[in-house]
Image: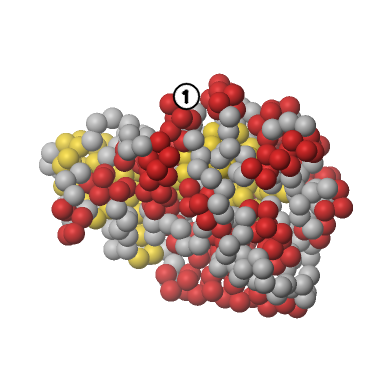
Amino acid sequence: MIENVHVAPVTGPEIPSGYIRIEGDRIAALGAGPAPAAPGATRIDGSGCLATPGLVNTHHHLYQWASQGLAQDATLFEWLVSLYPVWAAMDAEVVKGAAAAGLGWLALSGCTTSSDHHYLFPKGRGDLFAAGIEAAREIGVRFHPARGSMDLGESKGGLPPDVVVEELDEVLAATAEAVDAHHDPSFSSMLRVAVGPCSPFSASAELMTESAALARSKGVRLHTHIAETLDEEEHCLERFGTRPVDYVEKLGWLGPDVWFAHTVHLSDADIGKLAATGTGSAHCPSSNGRLGAGIARVSEMLRRGMNVGLGVDGSASSELTPLAGEMRQALLFQRARYGPGALTARQALELATLGGARNLGRADELGSLEPGKLADVVLWPVGSFAAAVADPVCALVFGPAPPPALVLVGGRTVVAGGELKTVSQDAAGRAGAAARRRLVRLAEERGVRPARHVHEDFTA
């Protein structure tokens, strides 16, 4: 029983002082005023706190935790070309350590559900997909990994080097195996698998089409990068004679079971198509700013009925970005582009919660505080210095978000008092640092010297 708390359900009116009753892994009730009697319940005093749904991260590349701080001044294509040879050296130990640190960091910013898009599978490096899943199980967050893929290497006109791509048949077999082994479609699932060819400049039309058919035959969702940069648009026009959204439409990649990462460079017609088909978007403002990709038209997308969630993107393109901070970034980016009425604090909170749940196909279970939904709840301290802000939702979104006082995933405590409780917080941080050291060593053994700036020499 959480009592004396300001409740922001996302759906429905806020409750300035009320309670939330949790039974098992579900929200049983919430309401205004003093908490009712609940013999035997664990009572939590939420005085000075704001209760929100757990935040949902809808785009990430957890392995990139081990390659932060590299190619610092690069465009997307420069950044990828610099880092593909480094990533080619990763193994399951690198992925496990990076994922442990990345997911622990997310949990400490109020994230209770995270996707992950892992699309590099160098041969002979262990079970990279299972390594991320194991880390998520230990941290205790809900996990939605997309089994990614690339089959369009440099020799076939793609961007990635041939050493990091796979053949079509092996991709489809491995993806089907990942779904069969790990996907749990149950209501309270902690683990669901999506299908995620990387992008139009690294996945062939055949891979995109066959992946969509595979996902739909197994009842799982589809995810890829689209319209992140103008370079991508130029690449699609030159190679396919069409813009990115039109291209993937031809491949069967629009629909309510699809969510795209970024969608920065959309035309009016693109937004109309995505809205009409129920196709979602993961907005990653910090990464888009870090790579100079641009500012997505989120306010216009929302106005026209598109679903938009938030993502922190790969750690190597938005170093140490907390998911809670992306609410502030989204709000400020939209206001910088369109004016102060472009996005409100409560719209930003909805992007981070219900918008994300919709992207992942879990709006009936997650994303709002309602009886019957899963008890993924975050308490944010808005007392002390933050108490000077009259509106607690404003304090959370406009200001730097404080470490959460409590993070519950299905009623289980993952964070309390601003510290991880499922694993040693220090150990998770050390695992991430060890993953970086190991990746650098493995890369150097292959003749690759990771570069901090694109003008620095590296050899592969």
User: Observer-nearest residue: 459 or 356?
Assistant: 459
Q: Is residue 197 visible?
A: no
Q: Residue at x 65, y 31 (%)?
A: 245
| Image quadrant in which the C terminus is located | bottom right
Q: Residue furthest top?
A: 276
Dot 1 alpha-carbon crowd within 10 angstroms: few under 14, some 14 to 19, many 20 or more: some
User: Observer-nearest residue: 90 or 44?
Assistant: 90
User: From the viewer's perspective, is 398 left or right of 443?
Assistant: left
Identify which amino acid the numbered label 1 is placed on: Arg
The residue to which callout 1 is attached is 304
Position of residue 368 measured from the top left corner of the image (x, y, whole percent): 36, 37
Q: Residue at x 69, y 33 (%)?
A: 243
Position of residue 263 measured from the top left corner of the image (x, y, whole percent): 57, 38
Q: Residue furthest right?
A: 155
Residue 270 sits in quarter: top right
333 is higher (above) or lower (below) than 123: above
Q: Residue at x 48, y 69 (%)?
A: 428
Q: Residue at x 61, y 70 (%)?
A: 452
Q: Is residue 119 visible?
A: yes
